[in-house]
Amino acid sequence: MESCLAVVCGAAGSEVFLTFPFIIVYILLHCQKIKIMGHKIKIQRVERGTTKSYYVNFPAALAEATQIEKGEELEWLMEDKNTFILRRVTPKKSALRRGKGLT
């Protein structure tokens, strides 16, 4: 199997060759740095008499990773027709201080 290479301009106009695995690792690290994470869900519609409700299931893995607790208040924000943001009413303190690592 042949290696895939990309050529980019380095310092002072020199060419730098990047291998495909390097590019993939860079993309993965970049995505982690900007904290991209997603879970697909389906909206459920329930009709009872004259009322109808829509339900969203919150994935257990996401709830555990973010330490969501039973009864905790969250609020929906609508950025536009395609983007909904769910956030805590009372934010939790971060385990890491901003700009500091785990050390």
Image (cartoon, rainbow, N blue to C red):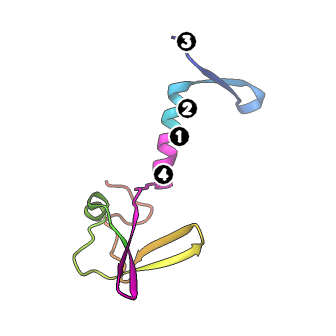
Determine the secondary structure under disc 3.
Answer: loop
Determine the secondary structure under disc 1.
Answer: helix
- Which residues are drawn in magenta? 27-54
68 or 28, nearer to the observer = 68
Residue matched to label 4: 33
Residue matched to label 2: 23
Q: Residue sitting at 74 percent across and 25 percent down?
A: 14
In the displayed image of the protein, which residue is found farthest to the bottom?
A: 50
**Spatial distance from mark 3 to mark 1, Cα to Cα?**
21 Å
In the displayed image of the protein, which residue is found farthest to the left?
A: 70
Task: Say whether residue 93 is left or right of residue 5.
Answer: left
Report x, y in % for residue 36: 47, 54
44 in magenta: yes
Residue matched to label 1: 27
Circles 4 and 3: CB atoms closer than 8 Å = no
Circles 2 and 1: CB atoms closer than 8 Å = yes
**Spatial distance from mark 2 to mark 1, Cα to Cα?**
6 Å
**Spatial distance from mark 4 to mark 3, Cα to Cα?**
30 Å
Q: Earlier in the sequence, mark 1 or mark 4?
A: 1
The relative height of residue 29 versus residue 50 in the rendered view (above or below) is: above
54 or 100, nearer to the observer = 54
Amino acid identity at mark 1: Ile
